[in-house]
Image (cartoon, grey):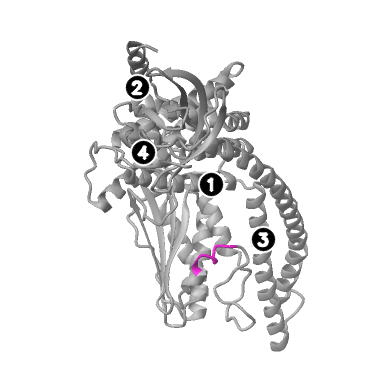
């Protein structure tokens, strides 16, 4: 090959986005283009005159692993062709980074397996929930009869009772009402788990709901000798958007628990308010502002090792046969599930011996009123078929992730390290959006436990994604561009579902847009916090370079 032709080839491969190595027949690297430098994390000078470490055979197409000095592993497609280079026979080795594609394929396969496992688990859970619902219903009928006849005896319908008889009837009533309350909790829990649970959302004054719950708690508190404030400390205009009856049910349960675990002469108080952003520990999804109901007691507190378990079903703070309080252990588990079904959350802070503070978070009314259609994913119309779009997106996880990678590479030619920093978070987000669409469809457009879980997972993924981008030296503009590209590429796939039903494609695109908008806000917030923690500026800082070497 002439010198001029060699230089022409050198100019061509220098501009290629794939990593190109010229390897002599002796296995020594003679040339490396800039993309290969970015792939291996070494300069051309460091790569040349070293052994490639992999037998290069003409026509060979395979996958190889690359491991950088910092421990990061990559997967690359390898292709080999015979050429003449600077007058000698050699191999042209082409390397394409397929790490994200492989991760996406593995993720899609794992999601498929998880979906099958989840379907089986849900079938079993559905059977369990239906059994509990039927049994609870069958138990309530005789219980109501027992309580009713006991009340008739108590009011002396058939004649006066003596003191001993009155005491026994009173005990029947106490035991019957307590058992009926437990049965009702089991029934509610079974309905939530089975998805057969209706919410009637509206705009409600926070003070009204709180004061009603406090009033209902007063008699129980007086019997226990606990001081409960009569009115909630709350601005009169604070309103939330949720199911008022279920909100009152949650608050009443929290207040009764606070009284139950507070010794005589102790105090229980409630305050409510509105904030633009929740506490960092709260798992909320979407824009603020948010309304909180905060119930504080001076009770026994909760050991730190038990805090995570108290929101699980059939778990209580006190354990063993010597516990001082009764109950099924379903109250807090049901309360958190109800809160999340209403796009809110329930959290706790506590110290043993100093009491506990439970906080219920709900969307503020002006952030989620029915007239504001652009703020909440759960306000979508119940368009049938969203699940089909979700399945379509799930089947295209790898293709969408690859398209995002290629577009980021094209955008960042001047910043080579960016081309290798697309992480598996992208594939996880795509798959999670698909799962959310399926959950919306299965719930008929209403919030469900599966949908709430998708939102919680995506918040965690988006936070990690933003923090990782900051650690790797990305800029705010690059991060936002990545989210924009993801919207575009998912939109292309969704349009495939609109060939016969334009309304389906429109609703799906709207759902995905809101989901990704919220995820982007969380990601950018985590990005900004991470930069602030390390004391770096939040502007367009250059991407930090990392170095690597091939695996031999």
Q: Work out whether mark 2 precedes mark 4 in sequence or the reverse, and give the earlier one.
A: 2
Q: Describe residue 486's horizontal placement relative to residue 505 as left or right.
A: left
Q: Mark 1 highlights which residue?
A: 452
The reply to whether the C-beta atoms of the residues labelled 2 and 4 are less than 8 Å apart is no
Q: Describe residue 43's horizontal placement relative to residue 54 as left or right.
A: left
The reply to whether the C-beta atoms of the residues labelled 4 and 1 are less than 8 Å apart is no
What secondary structure is found at the residue carrying circle 3? Answer: helix
Above or below, 96 relative to 376? above
Q: Mark 2 highlights which residue?
A: 14
To which quarter of the image does residue 187 belong? Answer: bottom right
- Give 475 or 264, whichever is nearer the viewer: 475
Q: Work out whether mark 3 precedes mark 1 in sequence or the reverse, and give the earlier one.
A: 3
Q: Nearer the viewer, mark 3 or mark 2?
A: 2
Q: Work out whether mark 3 precedes mark 4 in sequence or the reverse, and give the earlier one.
A: 4
Q: Residue at x 61, y 42 (%)?
A: 110
Q: Work out whether mark 2 precedes mark 1 in sequence or the reverse, and give the earlier one.
A: 2
Q: Residue at x 56, y 18 (%)?
A: 502
Q: For marks 3 and 4, give the CA distance.
A: 58 Å
Could you say where residue 106 lies in the image, as x and y percent from the top left?
58, 39
- The crowd level at tag 2 (other Cα within 10 Å; few <14, some 14-19, many 20+) is some
Q: Mark 4 highlights which residue?
A: 41
Q: Is residue 422 magenta?
A: no
The reply to whether the C-beta atoms of the residues labelled 3 and 2 are less than 8 Å apart is no
Q: Mark 3 highlights which residue?
A: 186
What secondary structure is found at the residue carrying circle 4? Answer: loop
Above or below, 415 relative to 362? above
What secondary structure is found at the residue carrying circle 2? Answer: helix
């Amino acid at each position: 090959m002439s010198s001029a032709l060699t230089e022409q080839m050198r100019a061509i491969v220098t501009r290629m986005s794939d990593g190109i190595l010229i390897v002599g027949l002796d296995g020594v690297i003679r040339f490396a283009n800039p993309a290969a430098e970015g792939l291996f994390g070494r300069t051309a000078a460091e790569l040349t005159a070293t052994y490639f470490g992999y037998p290069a055979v003409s026509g060979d197409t395979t996958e190889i692993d690359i491991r950088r000095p910092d421990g990061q592993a990559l997967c690359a497609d390898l292709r080999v062709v015979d050429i003449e280079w600077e007058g000698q026979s050699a191999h042209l080795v082409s390397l394409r980074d397929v790490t994200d594609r492989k991760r996406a394929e593995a993720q899609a396969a794992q999601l498929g397996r998880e979906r099958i496992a989840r379907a089986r688990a849900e079938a079993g859970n559905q059977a369990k929930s239906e059994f509990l619902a039927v049994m609870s219903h069958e138990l309530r009928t005789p219980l109501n009869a027992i309580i009713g006849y006991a009340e008739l005896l108590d009011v002396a319908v058939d004649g006066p009772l003596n003191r001993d008889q009155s005491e026994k009837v009173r005990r029947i009533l106490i035991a019957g009402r307590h058992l009926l309350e437990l049965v009702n909790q089991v029934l509610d829990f079974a309905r939530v788990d089975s998805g057969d649970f209706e919410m009637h959302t509206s705009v409600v004054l926070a003070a009204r709901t709180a004061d009603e719950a406090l009033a209902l708690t007063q008699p129980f508190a007086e019997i226990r000798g606990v001081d409960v404030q009569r009115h909630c400390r709350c601005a009169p205009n604070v309103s939330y958007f949720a199911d008022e009856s279920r909100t009152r049910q949650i608050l009443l349960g929290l207040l009764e628990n606070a009284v139950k675990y507070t010794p005589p002469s102790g105090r229980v108080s409630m305050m409510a308010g509105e904030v633009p952003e929740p506490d960092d520990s709260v798992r909320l999804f979407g824009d603020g502002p948010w309304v909180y109901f905060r119930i504080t007691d001076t009770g026994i507190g909760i050991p730190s090792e038990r805090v995570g378990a108290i929101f699980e079903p059939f778990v209580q703070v006190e354990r063993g046969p010597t516990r001082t309080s009764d109950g099924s252990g379903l109250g807090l588990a049901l309360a958190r599930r109800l809160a999340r079904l209403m796009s809110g959350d329930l959290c706790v802070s506590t110290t043993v011996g100093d009491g506990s503070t439970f906080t219920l978070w709900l969307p503020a009314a002006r952030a989620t009123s029915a007239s504001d259609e652009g703020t909440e994913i759960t306000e979508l119309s119940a368009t049938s078929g969203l699940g089909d779009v979700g399945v379509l997106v799930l089947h295209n996880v790898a293709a969408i992730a690859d398209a995002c990678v290629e577009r980021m590479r094209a955008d960042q030619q001047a910043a080579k390290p960016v081309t290798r920093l697309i992480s598996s978070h992208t594939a996880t987000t795509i798959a999670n959006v698909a799962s959310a669409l399926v959950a919306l469809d299965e719930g008929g457009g209403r919030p469900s436990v599966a949908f709430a879980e998708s939102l919680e997972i995506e918040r965690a993924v988006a936070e990690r994604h933003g923090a990782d981008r900051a650690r790797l030296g990305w800029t705010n503009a690059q991060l936002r561009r990545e989210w924009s590209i993801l919207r575009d590429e998912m939109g292309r796939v969704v349009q495939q579902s609109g060939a016969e039903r334009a309304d389906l494609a429109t609703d799906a695109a709207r759902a995905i847009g809101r989901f990704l908008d919220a995820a982007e806000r969380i990601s950018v917030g985590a990005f900004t916090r991470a930069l602030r923690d390390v004391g770096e500026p939040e502007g367009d800082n250059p991407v930090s370079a990392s170095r690597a070497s091939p695996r031999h």
